[in-house]
Amino acid sequence: MSYKLLIPALMLTTSSMSALAAPIYLNESNISVSVGQGTSAGSFNNTFSNGNTIQKVIDAPNADAAEFHNQGTHIWFTADAIGGGLELLFDFGTEYDLNTLHFWNYTAESYDVDNISFSFFDSSNSAVGSLSVSPDLGSSPGIYAQDIALSAPLNVQYVTAFLTGSNRQVDFQNIGFTAELSDPKPVSESSVFGLLGVAFAAMIARRRRTRTSGTY
Ligand SMILES: [Ca+2]
Ligand SMILES: [Ca+2]
């Protein structure tokens, strides 16, 4: 291959690669989390001591980060009754296709999370999937994420997670998602015709106005 031919070939490769959506890690820099109304009666223990907030759920810098268990890093909720749990509401700000769920659990059965029920919703709050996970115990002493491949819930903007422990204890470090920006939804035919109709009506209105002003 000559030098001249090589350059366009390279340019083509680069431009076609940049057209593909790259998976990104969703954390406090691009999503938000809050405590849901569905949280059962219970206690947050030391979770919010020293000005800490629920932001601790999404403060891991990346999916491979280690976190050490202390009041500045973990969430600890104790439900009053067995079956009770903590509800978390995630808002991604826009729609993503989810690839992997990352969960940093507590390191011992006495406090770890035993089940998480996830519900996924698109930007119009329509349900697009659900998932029940029984996560592994966290590693020790540094807690690393368990990576759980998701069977691609698509077009997800909102996620509800309900976390429970068989002994009422819910203690963990982080929840994270690796995802790709969803493709923009194709414009439906009816909305195209709707827009054409609006433009046509505006044209007629203008012609009428012109005629009217000509009469008077
Ligand atoms: Ca954390
Ligand atoms: Ca447990």
Image: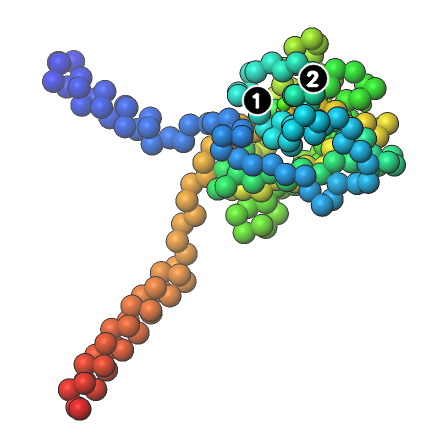
Q: Is residue 210 above or below residue 38?
A: below
Depth check: give the residue in front, 80 or 121: 80
Q: In this view, does 65 lie above or below 122?
A: above
Q: Is residue 97 visible?
A: no
Q: In this view, does 199 lie to the left or right of 43?
A: left
Q: Is residue 145 above or below residue 39?
A: above
Judged from the image, the secondary structure of the residue bearing numbered disc 2 is loop
At which x and y percent is residue 59? Answer: 57, 25
Q: Is residue 140 above or below residue 184?
A: above
Furthest residue to the top? Answer: 141
Kindly identify the residue that appears in the image at 28 percent across and 23 percent down.
13
Kindly identify the residue that appears in the image at 53 percent across and 21 percent down.
61
Question: In the rendered image, which quarter is residue 48 located in?
Answer: top right
Mark 1 nearby-residue class (10 Å; few <14, some 14–19, many ≥20)? many
Q: Report the amino acid beneath label 1.
A: Ala
Q: Residue 60: which disc? A: 1
Judged from the image, the secondary structure of the residue bearing numbered disc 1 is loop
Locate the C terminus and report the quarter of the image it occupies: bottom left
Whole-angstrom CA distance, mark 2 to mark 1, is 14 Å
At which x and y percent is residue 32? Answer: 56, 36
Name the residue that disc number 2 marks: 70
Ligand 1 within 8 Å, label 1 CB: yes
Q: Report the amino acid beneath label 2.
A: Asn
At which x and y percent is residue 113? Answer: 76, 26
Depth check: give the residue in front, 39 or 1: 39
Q: Is residue 127 left or right of residue 86?
A: left
